């Protein structure tokens, strides 16, 4: 058996080198495309035009509440604080949320919040890294409050 890499580069050798380069590039692109499609979390809304019709009115109503939200995870518990314009905890509102990773829906957790008079608390199972809380609260008057909060968990 002769060594194919010995001797001058001929037409068939040049073609083999050139085509193997493209085979590797195409194979990597296919693998990356399959991975990207497999981890795509999906659509936010089914019809963006319909969602846009009420967006401004909902945004103005939410801004009129003057609420600020903050979330933190300590151990196996997520603490959510929502403060009104006066800085006091919001009373009488209901809160719901989904905690998960930014790119993978496998880790999504629907949270069961319990209000303790100053904050909403929910048990969570998280690992280190960045988590996203999709918060949906409703004021006493029925005004929806939606916000996405980033929560960092240390190692």
Image (cartoon, rainbow, N blue to C red):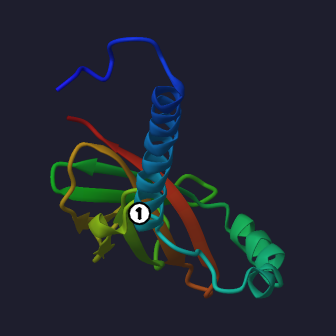
Where, quadrant-wise, is the C terminus in this rendering?
top left
Task: Report the residue at 56% width, 79% height from top.
Answer: 139
Left or right: residue 58 versus residue 111 is right
State the residue in front, 103 or 24: 24
Q: Position of residue 127 (x, y in %)?
A: 20, 49
Q: Is residue 143 above or below residue 125?
A: below
State the residue in front, 39 or 79: 39
Task: Report the residue at 37% width, 62% height from top.
Answer: 104
Task: Report the residue at 21% width, 63% height from top.
Answer: 124
Left or right: residue 62 versus residue 73 is right
Q: Can you tell which quarter of the image residue 51 is in?
A: bottom right
Q: Can you tell which quarter of the image residue 110 is in?
A: bottom left
Q: Position of residue 95 (x, y in %)?
A: 43, 76
From this viewpoint, which residue is outermost toward the front?
1
Label 1 crowding class (10 Å Cα cut-off): few <14, some 14-19, many 20+?
few
Task: Report the residue at 50% width, 22% height from top.
Answer: 10
Q: Secondary structure at mark 1?
A: loop
Using the rendered image of the protein, determine whether residue 42 is visible from the camera's viewpoint.
Answer: yes
Left or right: residue 79 versus residue 9 is left
**Figure label count:** 1
Q: Which residue is mark 1?
A: 39
Q: Position of residue 49 (x, y in %)?
A: 81, 83
Where, quadrant-wise, is the N terminus in this rendering?
top left
Q: Is residue 57 above or below residue 131?
A: below
State the residue in front, 90 or 79: 79
Q: Position of residue 151 (x, y in %)?
A: 39, 48
Using the rendered image of the protein, determine whether residue 113 is visible from the camera's viewpoint.
Answer: no
């Amino acid at each position: 058996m002769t060594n194919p890499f010995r001797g001058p580069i001929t037409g068939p050798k040049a073609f083999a080198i050139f085509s193997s380069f493209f085979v590797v590039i195409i194979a990597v692109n296919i693998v990356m495309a399959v991975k990207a499609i497999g981890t795509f979390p999906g659509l936010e809304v089914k019809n963006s035009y319909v969602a846009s019709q009420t967006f401004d009115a909902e945004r103005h109503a939410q801004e009129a509440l003057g609420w600020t939200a903050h979330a933190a995870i300590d151990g196996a518990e997520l603490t959510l604080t929502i403060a009104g314009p006066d800085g006091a905890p919001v009373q009488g509102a209901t809160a719901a949320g989904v905690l998960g990773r930014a790119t993978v829906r496998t880790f999504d957790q629907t949270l069961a919040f319990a209000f303790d008079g100053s904050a909403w608390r929910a048990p969570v199972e998280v690992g280190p890294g960045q988590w996203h809380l999709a918060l949906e609260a409703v004021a006493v008057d029925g005004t929806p409050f939606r916000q996405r909060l980033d929560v960092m968990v240390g190692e």
